[in-house]
Structure formats: structure tokens, C-alpha cells
């Protein structure tokens, strides 16, 4: 299978994680960041800086490769309002992804995918070009992001080849096969 390079489709796909609470969200926010990387986004933005979360992301990038723009300590609303491209807010109250994904995917514009934690401020619903639901039932920012990126890239993310990886997995039916990559 040939390698897929997400940047050839969209120059910028950033994920903005709103309302991270370091005291309780470390694990979920880390998973949001790892899903962003694994499913083809090339930027991760966090309102509240958290060394543990960003440290885990840096560690994965070092071992498993890939490059990401990483930013924290931003005002999410200002960031999303001044985004030069499409702002896509994932929410159970939005329009089902099936109905809008063609419009979103057919535009080459940079994409900011916004996911919340607890309650998302009303202004985000107003400034987003798209309020998109992954089914109109409550679940999680991790699952919502994974499914949205899967639809955006039509499943091709699974063939991304991460540059500068030190480790690669050799898929195997049983056990774990991991190889070191030289150079
Ligand atoms: N009331 C929230 C909402 O607006 O979707 C659910 C809170 S949930 C704990 C945290 C985040 O998960 C939300 O801000 C949203 O980004 C995402 N999320 C949860 N369910 C979703 C769904 N069905 N579709 C899209 N996003 C969802």
C-alpha cells in the first residue's frame, strides 16, 4: 500500500482542545492529542498549558515520528475567531457529519477542529462555520475526533508514514513486533 501524506490534501489541520483542567483531564486530553497525531492532524492547540500532556505528546513524536505544531496558553475563542480557514466545532448538538463532510472535505482551506470538555461556551457555536455531530448522542471528544478525522481523510490516515520514526510496528497476528529504524 502506498504511503498517504495528509498535507497533500490539507496544508493545515489543527485540533483545538477547549477547557483542559490539569487536575482531572490529563488522560483524556493526552488521548485527544494522540488521536490528532495518529489520524492525520498536524497541529495541537491547548488553552491551558500542561507539561504532562505535552510531554507525552513530544515523547510519542520522538519515538514514533511525525511533526506537529504544538501550542498552548491561548484564548480558545480568540484563536478560533481569527482562524484563517474553516472552524469545525464537534458537538452532539450539531449537524450529522454525513450531511456536511462533503462540503468540509472538498475545500482545501486550513481546518481547525474544536473539541470541548465540559460545557462549551455559546460563542463557539456562533463563530464555527460548522457545528458537526458524530451522531446526536453524548459520547466523548476522543471518539468524536477520531471519527471526524477518519471521515475527513476517508480512512487514508491509516497509511500515513511518519517521518523520523525511531520505532515501527510490524503488524503480527500474535505478540508484539517492533523494529528500530536506523538513521
Ligand atoms: N454537551 C457536550 C456536547 O456539546 O457535545 C458533550 C460533552 S462531552 C463530555 C465533551 C466533548 O465531546 C464535546 O465538547 C464535544 O466536542 C465532544 N462530543 C461528545 N459527544 C459528541 C457527539 N455526539 N458529536 C460530536 N462531538 C461530541
Image (spheres, grey):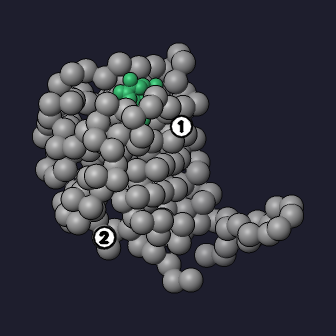
Q: Nearer the viewer, residue 95 or 45?
A: 95
- Helix, strand or loop status at disc 1: helix
> Is label 1 in contact with label 2 (beta carbons under 8 Å)?
no
Residue at the outermost top position: 23
Residue 97 is marked as none
Q: Nearer the viewer, residue 49 or 23?
A: 23
Q: Quadrant of ligand 1?
A: top left
Please say whether residue 48 is visible from this viewpoint.
no
Residue at screen point 62% across, 57% down: 63
- Helix, strand or loop status at disc 2: helix
Mark closer to the chain start, 1 or 2: 2
Please say whether residue 106 is visible from this viewpoint.
yes
Residue at screen point 23% across, 66% down: 106
Local crowd size for mark 1, using a 10 Å CA cut-off: few (<14), some (14–19), many (≥20): some
In the image, residue 149 sits, relative to residue 174, either above or below, namely: above
Q: CA distance from mark 1 to mark 2?
A: 26 Å
Residue at screen point 29% across, 36% down: 94
Q: Nearer the viewer, mark 1 or mark 2?
A: 2
Quadrant for the C terminus in the image:
bottom right
Q: Nearer the viewer, residue 57 or 176?
A: 176
Local crowd size for mark 2, using a 10 Å CA cut-off: few (<14), some (14–19), many (≥20): some
Q: Position of residue 139 (x, y in %)?
A: 50, 32
Q: Which residue is mark 2?
A: 9
* Number of callouts: 2
Residue at the outermost right position: 174
Q: Position of residue 91 (x, y in %)?
A: 34, 34
Residue at screen point 58% across, 48% down: 59
Q: Is residue 13 left or right of residue 134?
A: left
Q: Position of residue 146 (x, y in %)?
A: 48, 49
Is the residue at mark 2 in contact range of ligand 1, meaning its CB lies under 8 Å from it? Answer: no
Residue 30 is marked as 1
Q: Quadrant of residue 121?
A: top left
Amino acid at each position: 500500500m502506498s504511503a498517504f501524506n495528509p498535507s497533500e490534501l490539507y496544508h493545515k489541520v489543527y485540533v483545538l482542545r477547549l477547557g483542559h483542567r490539569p487536575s482531572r483531564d490529563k488522560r483524556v486530553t493526552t488521548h485527544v492529542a494522540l488521536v490528532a497525531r495518529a489520524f492525520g492532524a498536524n497541529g495541537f492547540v491547548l488553552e491551558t498549558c500542561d507539561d504532562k500532556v505535552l510531554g507525552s505528546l513530544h515523547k510519542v513524536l520522538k519515538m514514533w515520528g511525525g511533526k506537529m505544531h504544538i501550542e498552548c496558553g491561548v484564548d480558545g475563542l480568540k484563536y478560533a475567531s481569527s482562524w484563517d480557514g474553516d472552524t469545525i466545532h464537534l458537538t452532539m448538538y450539531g449537524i450529522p457529519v454525513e450531511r456536511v463532510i462533503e462540503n468540509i472535505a472538498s475545500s482545501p482551506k486550513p481546518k481547525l477542529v474544536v473539541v470541548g470538555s465540559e460545557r462549551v461556551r455559546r460563542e463557539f457555536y456562533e463563530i464555527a462555520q460548522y457545528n458537526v455531530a458524530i451522531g446526536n448522542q453524548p459520547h466523548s471528544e476522543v471518539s468524536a475526533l477520531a471519527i471526524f478525522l477518519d471521515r475527513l481523510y476517508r480512512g487514508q490516515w491509516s497509511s500515513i508514514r511518519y517521518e523520523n520514526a525511531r520505532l515501527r510496528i510490524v503488524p503480527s497476528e500474535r505478540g508484539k513486533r517492533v523494529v528500530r529504524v536506523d538513521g
